[in-house]
Image (tube, rainbow, N blue to C red):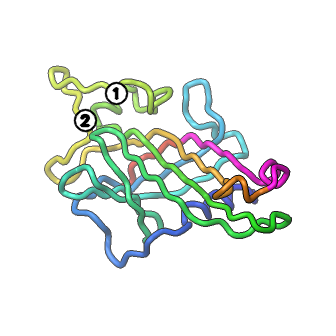
Amino acid sequence: MKKHRIIATFLLLGLSCTASLPGEVDAGLFDFFASTAQEENCKPHRADGDNFTFEGRFRLENNLVDGHFVYRNTHRSAQFNGQNMRSVHEAEHGPVQGCKGCQWRVLETLEVVLLSETQNEAFNGQCPCNALEEEIPVDEARNIFPPRPVPGGFDAVRACGVLQVRVEPLTEQDCPQKCREENEKKMDYYLEGIRRE
């Protein structure tokens, strides 16, 4: 349980406060489930205890490239390539006991494939395996369209991808090897997000 609170805290590190939602295009509010393990059907493993949930909203500027990931009324920058949404954030980490002189950072990367309603149907309402590497179908002849603005909103109903968290020293030469071995962390979480609004 403690580990989950730590990861959830990472999502808050260094985010910019905002009184109103950034961006002109609302790409949706998603309920995310994150787990370090996957089931055979490639969904994040819910029976495992090493998981947590959170909600986040994607917003885009009118160019549909520059974007934002909004979490608890705070936001950070993101980029959209027409299918994938990627947000990378770096923040300073507090001092680590027993590692005098070391400066640490948290590097967090959230990357998901946004699936339109027709793409989601093509995958039978589930995240594809290795979503970030798999070719996502776009075939107008078969009425399979990418995520895009549509009358009344933005066509994206599911988000599939990963959350990578890295805790590492800013400069390795300032930190003894023993200190790095005991405190460096690499955590990868499989993500599935279902659009709520």
Residue lying at 60% horizontally and 66% vertically, measured from the top left: 92
- Taking the image as shown, residue 63 lies to the left or right of residue 122, namely left
Q: Which residue is mark 2?
A: 146
**Do tag 2 and tag 1 residues touch (Cβ < 8 Å)?**
yes
- Taking the image as shown, residue 48 lies to the left or right of residue 166, namely right
List x then y, in percent, for residue 106.
Answer: 61, 58
The furthest residue to the top: 141
Report if residue 180 lies within the magenta region: yes
Query: Upstream in the sequence, badge 2 or badge 1?
Result: 1
Q: Which quadrant: the C terminus?
A: bottom left
List x then y, in percent, for residue 68.
Answer: 35, 59
Q: CA distance from mark 2 to mark 1?
A: 9 Å
Q: Report the magenta residues as a range.
A: 176-190
- Assign a secondary structure to mark 2: loop
Residue type at mark 1?
A: Ile
Label 1 Cα neighbours within 10 Å, binned few <14 / some 14-19 / many ≥20:
some
Report if residue 56 lies within the magenta region: no
Label 2 Cα neighbours within 10 Å, binned few <14 / some 14-19 / many ≥20:
many
Q: Which residue is mark 1?
A: 136
Residue lying at 63% horizontally and 37% vertically, measured from the top left: 45
Does residue 93 lie above or below 152 as drawn?
A: below
The furthest residue to the front: 173
Camera-side residue of 154 and 74:
74
Does residue 5 lie above or below 166 as drawn?
A: below
- Assign a secondary structure to mark 1: loop
Residue type at mark 2?
A: Pro
Determine the image quadrant of residue 131: top left
List x then y, in percent, for residue 87.
Answer: 43, 52
- Taking the image as shown, residue 53 lies to the left or right of residue 193, namely right
Q: Which quadrant: the N terminus?
A: bottom right
Residue lying at 31% horizontally and 58% vertically, measured from the top left: 59
